Image: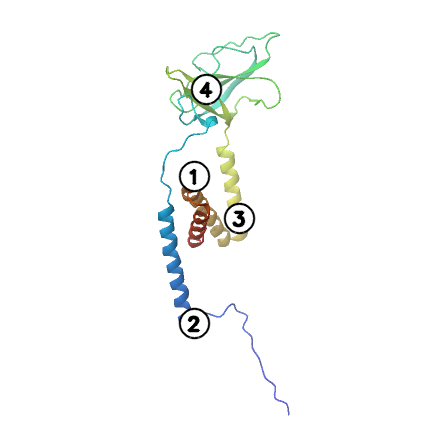
């Protein structure tokens, strides 16, 4: 009479490591961690100053300062008004007529040393020119020349709050769909961003070798996650 043999197969995940294998793995992780920390200390950026690219320099060669502002009015006007870009405290009177081929936007300065005052921005008409509407929130550059005269110019639309809202909505969707895994993934993204900004890019800027920097940065991200 044939004898039947029952075989049971466990499908509950990988088998646990034995005591010796576990000690070897832990020892390797500790050794690699020490090497990574040593490499990070060796490659840590020196915080040396670098030349600011010309598009981002002010008149004195320093970094461009931007301030917050919002549009009070916008109307057609003749080009070349002497008050464009200056700090003004009175309502300007734009000259109209057939020569009014430019657009003057009166901007309220919402931050910086001239907060509460206004400035006047001038734009041409055509492709690539910003079309400011009343109530738009924008960023304006502040330049101070050697004589102390402050001038302003258009920099960009204010994007901080829209981008913050998009990031918050993205995080909520990820957590709602993936739960704790999604939250851990977001933390991993944040850690990777910090390592990239604080260590990797400054180290490459300092002239460190790209491969060691990349290896150390990726290892730090893996350990953090």
Q: Work out whether residue 5 or residue 127 is closer to the camera in this orientation and state it.
A: 127
Image quarter (top left, top right, bottom left or bottom right) of the N terminus = bottom right
Q: Work out whether residue 88 or residue 60 is closer to the camera in this orientation and state it.
A: 60
Local SS, label 2: loop
Is 127 above or below relative to 19?
Answer: above
Label 3 vs 1, first from the N-terminus: 3
> Where is mark 2, residue-wise?
18
> Where is mark 1, residue-wise?
205
Label 4 vs 3, first from the N-terminus: 4
> Where is mark 3, residue-wise?
174
Q: Residue furthest bottom?
A: 1
Q: Work out whether residue 101 or residue 209 is closer to the camera in this orientation and state it.
A: 209
Label 1 vs 2, first from the N-terminus: 2
Residue 51 position in % (x across, y down):
41, 30
Q: Is there a contact, CB below 8 Å, between mark 4 and mark 3?
A: no
> Where is mark 4, residue-wise?
152
């Amino acid at each position: 009479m044939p004898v039947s043999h029952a075989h049971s197969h466990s499908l509950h995940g990988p088998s646990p490591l034995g005591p010796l294998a576990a000690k070897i793995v832990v020892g390797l992780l500790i050794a690699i961690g020490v090497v990574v920390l040593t490499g990070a200390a060796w490659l840590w950026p020196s915080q040396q100053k670098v030349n600011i690219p010309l598009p981002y320099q002010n008149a004195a060669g320093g970094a461009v300062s931007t301030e917050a502002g919002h549009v009070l009015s916008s109307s057609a006007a003749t080009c070349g008004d002497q008050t464009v870009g200056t700090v003004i405290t009175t309502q300007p009177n734009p000259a109209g007529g057939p020569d009014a081929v430019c657009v003057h936007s009166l901007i309220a300065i919402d931050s910086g040393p001239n907060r509460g005052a206004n400035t006047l921005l001038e734009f041409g008409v055509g492709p690539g020119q910003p079309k400011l509407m009343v109530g738009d929130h924008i960023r304006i550059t502040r330049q101070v020349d050697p004589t102390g005269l402050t001038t302003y110019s258009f920099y960009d639309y204010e994007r901080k709050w829209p981008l913050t809202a998009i990031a918050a909505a993205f995080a909520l969707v990820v957590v709602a769909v993936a739960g704790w895994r999604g939250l851990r993934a977001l933390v991993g993204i944040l850690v990777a961003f910090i390592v990239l900004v604080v260590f990797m890019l400054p180290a490459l800027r300092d002239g460190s070798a790209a491969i060691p920097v990349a290896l150390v940065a990726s290892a730090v991200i893996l350990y953090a996650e």
